[in-house]
Amino acid sequence: MTMTEYFIALDLPLDEDLADFSALLWQQGVAHHIAEEGNRQLLRVGDAQQQEQVRALYSRLKTGELHIERRSAPTRSAPVLQRRSGPVVWVLLLLSIAGALLPQLDRSFESVALLTFYPLDLESGQLLAQWPVGEPWRLLTPMFLHFGLMHIAFNGLWLWELGGMIERRQGGMALLGLVLLVAAASNMAQAMMTVSLFGGMSGVIYGLLGYILAWNRLRPVEAFPLVRGVATVMLIWLLVCMAGFTRLLGLGEIANTAHFSGLVMGLLLGVAASFLRRRPV
């Protein structure tokens, strides 16, 4: 089976509610993905054996041989419950908010100086062009620094959406490991380009996007439910920033290297995770 191969088990009208049937399949260990195509919904599985299993279960359901107990909560409430983020997203979000408040609360900049990638000389106000060999936390902490309300608002929104998606599907440790690796890679890449004060979760956000795109491409049966058009908008914005239009719009300098390297790192980790998932136990 190729990396992108899947089997269509069911091809049904959009108005047929498959929520309870999907829950039954997950209970029986049948990994699957339901996608809309035109006015139809397709239920996909990873191999021919599961394809026959799903069709047999669905046939029994339609003939009345199989009875599925209705969930106590209404179907329409399920998406709301599924969108709740886990503890890792909450901690990252709260630390980012704290990082956004630091420049306002600490006018001496002493606390901010502890979080920058390059050490900051408080007397001269200049960054010291030396890598944080003895202060390894600096490889990560710039992601918590945010400069302005819009900066933290946009990054917080995408962290909640993309990070929450990964944490719900693959767990908090998977998300945490992904964030730490992407943050370190994107911060180091940005630091190699220029000695400057940079910060924000944007490199990590693009890493999460890259991870999801790679995973969805290679594991369509277990794809993340990324809203159509989101990736396109984010990639267009990346190109706009890299082209320098943000300066013309008065938005200042953007850490483009961190964004791009974060995206690449996320893609690589998504590919690696997909291969590891397929490795026999």
Image (cartoon, rainbow, N blue to C red):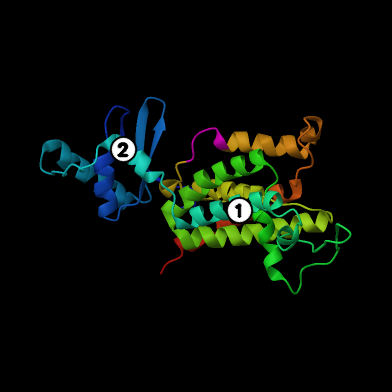
Judged from this view, the residue extending furthest toward the bottom is 134
Mark sitting earlier along the chain (2/1): 2
Q: Quadrant of residue 139?
A: bottom right
Residue 78 in picture, x, y percent from top left: 32, 40
Residue 239 is labelled as: none
Residue 104 in picture, x, y percent from top left: 69, 48
Q: Identify the residue at image location x=65%, y=58%.
A: 183
Compared across the picture, whether 260 is left or right of 191 comes to: left
Compared across the picture, whether 18 is left or right of 189 comes to: left
Residue 89 in picture, x, y percent from top left: 50, 53
> Is residue 75 shown above or below 4?
above
Residue 98 is labelled as: 1
Residue 77 is labelled as: 2
Q: Identify the residue at image location x=27%, y=37%.
A: 75
Residue 102 in picture, x, y percent from top left: 67, 53
| Range of residues picked out in magenta | 226-230
Q: Is residue 82 visible?
A: yes
Q: Is residue 10 visible?
A: no
Report the mark closest to the observer, 2 or 1: 1
> Is residue 63 shown above or below 188?
above
Residue 220 sits inside the magenta stretch: no
Q: Secondary structure at mark 1?
A: helix
Q: Identify the residue at image location x=76%, y=35%.
A: 251
Q: CA distance from mark 2 to mark 1?
A: 32 Å
Within-10-Å neighbours for mark 1: few <14, some 14–19, many 20+: some
Q: Nearer the viewer, residue 124 or 116?
A: 124
Dominant secondary structure (helix, strand or loop) of the stretch shown in magenta: loop
Q: Secondary structure at mark 2?
A: helix
Q: Nearer the viewer, residue 106 or 70?
A: 106
Q: Identify residue type, mark 1.
A: Ala
